[in-house]
Amino acid sequence: MIDPVEVAITFLKPRLSGVAVSGSLVGHATNSRRLVVTLIGGTREVRNRLDRWRLDFDAYGPDKRAALQVALTAREFLLEEMPGRTVGGVVVADVSEELGPSDISDPVSREQRFVFSHAIYLYRS
């Protein structure tokens, strides 16, 4: 079984210096740089071979500019460097953008946050 959230976190974590990358807000310090990866759903594209997973990303920062920088940097790595890579024995066939970064403050903490979505196509090598 492939965990698409773990694939994305494993890929992004070493590339986003100074940003906590995780699957939740547990341990999040308000106004710090964080990228939260959430699985929204997926479909089997090729039987027993290729899955398309939709992931949402929430980019936080101490101010609007910092939150946008986290979002745009993660977006660039996802679209430009992730396709064709093998991450933990999983091949990333492609990545496509579903929704570009949108300025939506966190409704609970009122922190600066940009949300965006990508589809990643994965199969076992």
Image: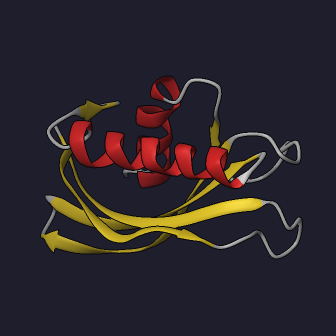
Say left or right for 39 vs 34.
left
Residue 78, compared with residue 57, is above or below; it is: above
Number of numbered labels in the structure image: 0
Residue 46 locus on image (x, y percent): 10, 68
Q: Nearer the viewer, residue 113 or 48?
A: 113
**Residue 110 in view in this figure:** yes
Residue 5, compared with residue 43, is above or below; it is: above
Residue 34 locus on image (x, y percent): 68, 43
Residue 116 locus on image (x, y percent): 48, 66
Q: Name the residue located 77 percent from the left edge and 69 percent from the top edge.
A: 106
Say left or right for 90 vs 4.
left
User: Considering the image in quadrants, where does the C terminus appear?
Assistant: top left
Residue lying furthest front: 65
Q: Name the residue located 77 percent from the left edge and 52 percent from the top edge.
A: 25
Q: Name the residue located 41 percent from the left edge and 42 percent from the top edge.
A: 7
Residue 20 locus on image (x, y percent): 67, 35
**Residue 35 in view in this figure:** no
Q: Nearer the viewer, residue 4 or 31?
A: 31
Colour setting = secondary structure
Q: Name the residue located 83 percent from the left edge and 46 percent from the top edge.
A: 31
Say left or right for 112 vs 65.
right
Q: Nearer the viewer, residue 88 or 83?
A: 83
Q: Nearer the viewer, residue 54 or 59?
A: 59
